[in-house]
Image (spheres, rainbow, N blue to C red):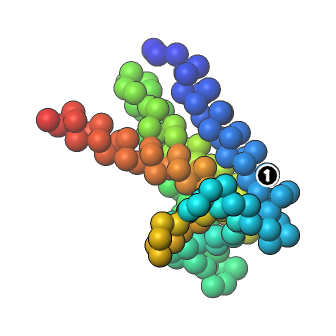
């Protein structure tokens, strides 16, 4: 069976990178300060109570916990699927990225009541929704799985 060392290092490193970057945002941006990195990229603290792009934003404490329960079930399902792939000697790096980001965002949701977002990108008049490193891990994990399955079918 393939060693779990590389996937574990990927999980731990991306998880810690996200946690530390969110700590940076909470410490340096919580006073409403926006840090301009360069034209089109700012760091600005934002709280997301919903899922991607604030979709499914809960309006009551009950709906918040129902959403959190669904997210927990999703994380559990991805973890089981990832373990199954690992046992069957399949690559799991894309799934690990999704797990890393989803777990970190779930911790925010339970701990703070919302996900810490702070990467604020824009281009001319288009303003992209504020996101974090965990969101990037989830996005690249999903895109990686999509392209991997597309390539294997060809």
Which quadrant is the C terminus positioned in? top left
Residue 136 shows up from this direction: yes
Percent coordinates x, y for residue 38 in the rendering: 62, 56
Is 85 displayed left or right of 64 in the figure?
left
Is 7 displayed left or right of 104 in the figure?
left
Residue 67 shows up from this direction: no
Residue sticking out furthest to the left: 154
Q: Which residue is drawn at 76% across and 57% down?
A: 25
Q: Which residue is drawn at 60% across and 27% down?
A: 8
Instruction: Establish if 137 lies above or below 112.
Output: above
Badge 1 crowding class, 10 Å Cα cut-off, few under 14, some 14 to 19, many 20 or more, is some
Residue sticking out furthest to the bottom: 59
Which quadrant is the N terminus positioned in? top left
Name the residue carrying label 1: 24
Percent coordinates x, y for residue 49 in the rendering: 64, 72
Q: Which residue is drawn at 67% across and 55% down?
A: 37
Is 133 or 63 nearer to us in this picture?
133
Instruction: Establish if 150 lies above or below 42.
Output: above
Is 130 or 12 nearer to us in this picture?
130
Percent coordinates x, y for residue 79 in the rendering: 52, 41
User: Which secondary structure lies at badge 1?
Assistant: helix
Q: Residue at x 52, y 66 (%)?
A: 122
Q: How many marks?
A: 1
Image quadrant assignment for residue 135 = bottom right
Is 112 or 67 nearer to us in this picture?
112
Image quadrant assignment for residue 62 = bottom right
Percent coordinates x, y for residue 90 in the rendering: 37, 26
């Amino acid at each position: 069976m393939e060693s779990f060392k590389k996937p574990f290092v990927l999980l731990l490193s991306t998880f810690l990178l996200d946690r530390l970057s969110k700590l940076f945002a909470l410490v340096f941006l919580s006073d409403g300060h926006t840090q301009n990195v360069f034209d089109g990229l700012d760091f600005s603290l934002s709280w997301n109570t919903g899922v991607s792009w604030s979709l499914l934003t809960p309006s009551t404490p009950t709906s918040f916990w129902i959403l959190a329960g669904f997210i927990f079930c999703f994380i559990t399902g991805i973890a089981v699927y990832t373990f199954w792939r690992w046992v069957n000697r399949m690559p799991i790096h894309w799934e690990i990225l999704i797990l890393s980001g989803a777990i970190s965002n779930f911790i925010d949701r339970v701990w703070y009541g919302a996900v810490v977002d702070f990467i604020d990108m824009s281009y001319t008049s288009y303003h992209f929704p504020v996101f974090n490193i965990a969101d990037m891990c989830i996005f690249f994990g999903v895109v990686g799985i999509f392209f991997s399955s597309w390539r294997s079918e060809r």
